[in-house]
């Protein structure tokens, strides 16, 4: 007998739990567009909450799954629906949630909110020339890039862009494959058992936008708040070093601070400075990183924050987000904030909405920019990551689905 639940189905990520009664073996998960499998995996993530509901099951404790997939796959396969199936060997145990693909993209079913300046400036010029359009759409620009990739070009700027993007995507996938998977200091019952809390699909969107900002001459360092074991920093530090951007990492290196959260505990998601430094040395570019140890309110008070091209935060708590946002005035007006703990519900087109709470990190982002007299636009990217930029003067972020169409062509 199969027990199965789909917790989340968002652009780029599927998560839930599944197990077969009276068996301890993991079950296989397939995510399909039409007849094509876009990602497969097995249950192996600790789910103490599920085990608590099914104490007699041998497999309930490690019944969780979290699979990331290229958002652009939905468009490439031309599927109108997405199907999640559960298998044991060659036997299908069940299937769940046939979801209209338009719900995973944007409200009108396109590849994301249309924006103006979201690719390197020389690509927009090429799109203007090749499409004979003074204001080409996202789809037209992506088609232009793919056409240039497929036909070949001697344009030096374009070749550098494709070379960087290809190398960055390859590096992200390398880190995703070889970075330590299991936290040796956590038990099967701990929420921080797994070291990889984001996906390469999420991080490559940040990396691409850094390239875009550099192409427009936007200056500044890049900051990461909340590093855990250094997984995302291993990808981002490599990209920053390649682009000549200094990277600053802020973390207590002792886990989350005390808070009013009913879900997170003080000390969750701890990675020592030595551990994080070692991982980035192996998988990233540690020579390009400046580390700032301490809770954010202390470390930010004791450092001179440079001008920032953008920042990335995975901080879990509202109070931590509020501390991070004290540096929002240091972000270049053209730059962006990238934040974990984002969902599709936080965005209506390009408008950002949220509900406040001890575990809500989006509210402080909106509030701080309002204090600075700046309204925000934003977009959901993939997994649990969203992007936020000034409505006036900010350079919008390329929709994740469009980026993955480009990556697939490369």
Image (spheres, rainbow, N blue to C red):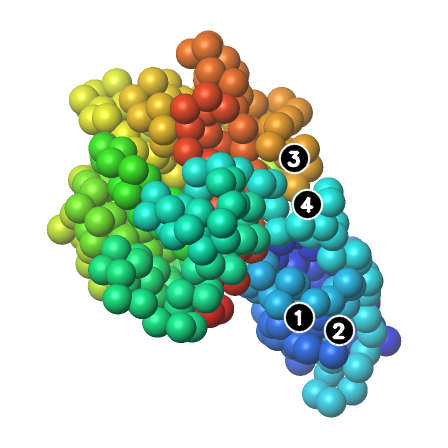
Q: Earlier in the sequence, mark 2 or mark 4?
A: 2
Q: CA distance from mark 3 to mark 4?
A: 7 Å
Residue at point 23% right, 32% down?
220
- Image quarter (top left, top right, bottom left or bottom right) of the C terminus: bottom left
Residue named by callout 2: 34
Q: Percent x, y for residue 365?
A: 49, 24
Q: On the rendered structure, is 369 left or right of 50? A: left
Q: Earlier in the sequence, mark 3 or mark 2?
A: 2
Residue at point 33% right, 48% down?
122
Residue 77, label in figure: 1
Q: Percent x, y for residue 92?
A: 79, 82
Residue at point 27% right, 41% down?
214
Numbered disc 3: secondary structure: loop
Residue 315 or 31: which is nearer the viewer? Answer: 31
Q: On the rendered structure, is 215 left or right of 1? A: left
Numbered disc 4: secondary structure: loop
Residue named by callout 4: 106
Label 1: few (<14), some or many (≥20) within 10 Å?
A: some
- C-beta proximity under 8 Å, tags 2 and 1: yes
Q: CA distance from mark 2 to mark 4?
A: 20 Å
Residue named by callout 3: 349
Q: CA distance from mark 1 to mark 3?
A: 24 Å
């Amino acid at each position: 007998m199969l027990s199965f639940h789909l917790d989340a189905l968002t652009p780029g990520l599927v998560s839930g739990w599944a197990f077969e009664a009276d068996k301890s073996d993991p079950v296989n998960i397939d995510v399909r567009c039409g007849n094509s499998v876009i990602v497969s995996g097995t249950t192996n993530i600790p789910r103490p909450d599920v085990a608590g509901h099914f104490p007699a099951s041998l497999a309930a404790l490690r019944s969780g799954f979290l699979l990331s997939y290229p958002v652009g796959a939905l468009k490439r396969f031309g599927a109108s629906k997405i199907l999640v199936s559960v298998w044991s060997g060659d036997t299908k145990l069940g299937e769940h949630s046939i979801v209209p693909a338009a719900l995973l993209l944007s409200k009108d079913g396109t590849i994301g909110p249309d924006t103006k300046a979201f690719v390197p400036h020389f690509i927009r010029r090429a799109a203007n020339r090749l499409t004979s359009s003074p204001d080409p759409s996202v789809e037209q620009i992506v088609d232009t890039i793919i056409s240039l990739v497929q036909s070949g070009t001697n344009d030096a700027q374009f070749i550098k862009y494709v070379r960087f993007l290809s190398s960055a995507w390859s590096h992200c996938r390398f880190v995703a494959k070889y970075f330590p998977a299991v936290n040796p200091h956590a038990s099967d019952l701990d929420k921080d058992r797994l070291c990889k809390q984001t996906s390469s699909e999420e991080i490559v969107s940040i990396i691409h936008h850094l390239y875009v900002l550099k192409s427009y001459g936007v200056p500044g360092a890049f900051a990461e708040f909340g590093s855990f074991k250094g997984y995302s920093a291993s990808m981002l530090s490599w990209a920053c070093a390649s682009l000549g951007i200094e990277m600053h990492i802020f973390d207590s290196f002792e886990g989350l601070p005390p808070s009013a959260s009913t879900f997170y505990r003080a000390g969750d998601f701890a990675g020592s400075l030595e551990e994080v430094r070692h991982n980035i040395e192996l998988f990233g570019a540690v020579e390009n990183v400046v580390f700032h140890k301490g809770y954010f309110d202390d470390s930010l008070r004791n450092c001179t924050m440079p001008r920032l091209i953008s920042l990335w935060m995975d901080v879990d708590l509202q109070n931590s987000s509020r501390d991070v946002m004290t540096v929002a005035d240091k972000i270049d007006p053209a730059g962006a904030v990238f934040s974990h703990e984002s969902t599709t519900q936080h965005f209506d087109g390009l408008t950002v909405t949220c509900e406040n709470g001890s575990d809500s990190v989006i509210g402080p982002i909106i509030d701080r920019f309002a204090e600075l007299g700046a309204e925000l636009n934003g977009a959901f990217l993939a997994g649990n990551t969203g992007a936020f930029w000034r409505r006036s003067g900010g350079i919008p972020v390329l929709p994740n689905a469009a980026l993955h169409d480009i990556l697939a062509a490369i």
